[in-house]
């Protein structure tokens, strides 16, 4: 583990965030790591990082430092290189609940992840923008059923805008990773 800085940790884990452009991947990372929401859609070039230490409810509790990698404007399958996935033990597969096509794309994203990612990755399906439920195009039941059918480890609906369930999504991935150590 590491004990430098304000957040000591027992384990460190690389998490990749994938999904269609504008699903809210960057916003989720910023919400978790910096506790704020930015309204402009900044398509940055290259890979961006955020990190946050999450406590997993084991006995004794363990602190997992999540290093979250963000695709940053390379949201086409071919543009993402193998190095993006290398060493990642967890993944957030993100779609926007108000745009059905972003949910349908998850089929291809998951395929890509299973081809290029590490074996035994903990994959969490995240339906983002739950604050816009009035414009919903994907039901919770449908997404849950698909996540179950694909053997994904969890399904969470989040809002990077309000912060709702964001912590829960990352805690589920951290817990799953810890259980696989
Ligand atoms: P990315 O391309 O997947 O990284 O998506 P971004 O994080 O850049 O977000 C795309 C757009 O959706 C931006 O305008 C965000 O402000 C907005 N956005 C992201 N998350 C949410 C959310 O939970 N609710 C709402 N209402 N807007 C969001
Ligand atoms: Mg982004």
Image (tube, grey):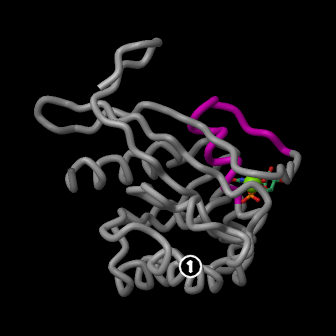
Q: Which residue carries the number 1 mark?
A: 139
- Give the image quarter of residue 171: top left
Relative to 62, does residue 129 appear above or below in the rendering? below
Q: Assign ligand 2 to one image quadrant.
A: bottom right
* Magenta-drawn stretch contains 32: yes
Relative to 34, does residue 19 appear above or below in the rendering? below
Q: Is residue 134 left or right of residue 55?
A: right
- The x, y position of residue 147, in whole percent, is 42, 78
Q: Tell which of 25 and 89 is nearer to you.
A: 89
* Magenta-drawn stretch contains 74: no
Residue drawn at x 80%, y 40% is 38
Q: Is residue 99 left or right of residue 149?
A: right
Which type of secondary structure does the marked residue at label 1 adopt?
A: loop
Q: Is residue 79 left or right of residue 177?
A: right
Outermost residue on the left side: it is 59
- The x, y position of residue 37, in whole percent, is 73, 38
Q: Tell which of 128 and 56 is nearer to you.
A: 56
Q: Tell which of 111 and 127 is nearer to you.
A: 111
Q: Main secondary structure of the magenta part?
A: helix
Q: How many marks?
A: 1
Residue drawn at x 45%, y 12% is 6
- The x, y position of residue 149, in whole percent, is 36, 87
Instruction: Find the magenta span and give its range.
Output: 24-39
Residue drawn at x 68%, y 57% is 71
Residue drawn at x 29%, y 48% is 175
For the N terminus, the quadrant is top left
Relative to 80, does residue 159 appear above or below in the rendering? above
């Amino acid at each position: 583990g590491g004990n430098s800085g304000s957040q000591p940790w027992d384990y460190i884990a690389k998490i990749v965030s994938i999904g269609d452009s504008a699903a809210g991947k960057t916003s989720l990372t910023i919400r978790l790591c910096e506790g704020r929401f930015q309204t402009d859609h900044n398509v940055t070039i290259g890979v961006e990082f955020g990190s946050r230490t999450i406590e997993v409810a084991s006995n004794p509790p363990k602190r997992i430092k999540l290093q979250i990698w963000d695709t940053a404007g390379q949201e086409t399958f071919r543009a993402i290189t193998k190095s993006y996935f290398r060493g990642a033990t967890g993944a957030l597969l993100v779609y926007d609940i108000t745009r059905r096509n972003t949910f349908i794309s998850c089929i291809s994203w998951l395929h890509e992840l299973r081809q290029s990612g590490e074996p035994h990755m903990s994959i969490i399906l995240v339906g983002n923008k739950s604050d816009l439920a009035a414009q919903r195009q994907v039901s919770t039941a449908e997404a849950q059923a698909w996540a179950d059918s694909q053997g994904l480890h969890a399904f969470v609906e989040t809002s990077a805008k309000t912060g709702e369930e964001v912590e829960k999504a990352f805690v589920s991935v951290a817990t799953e990773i810890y259980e696989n150590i």
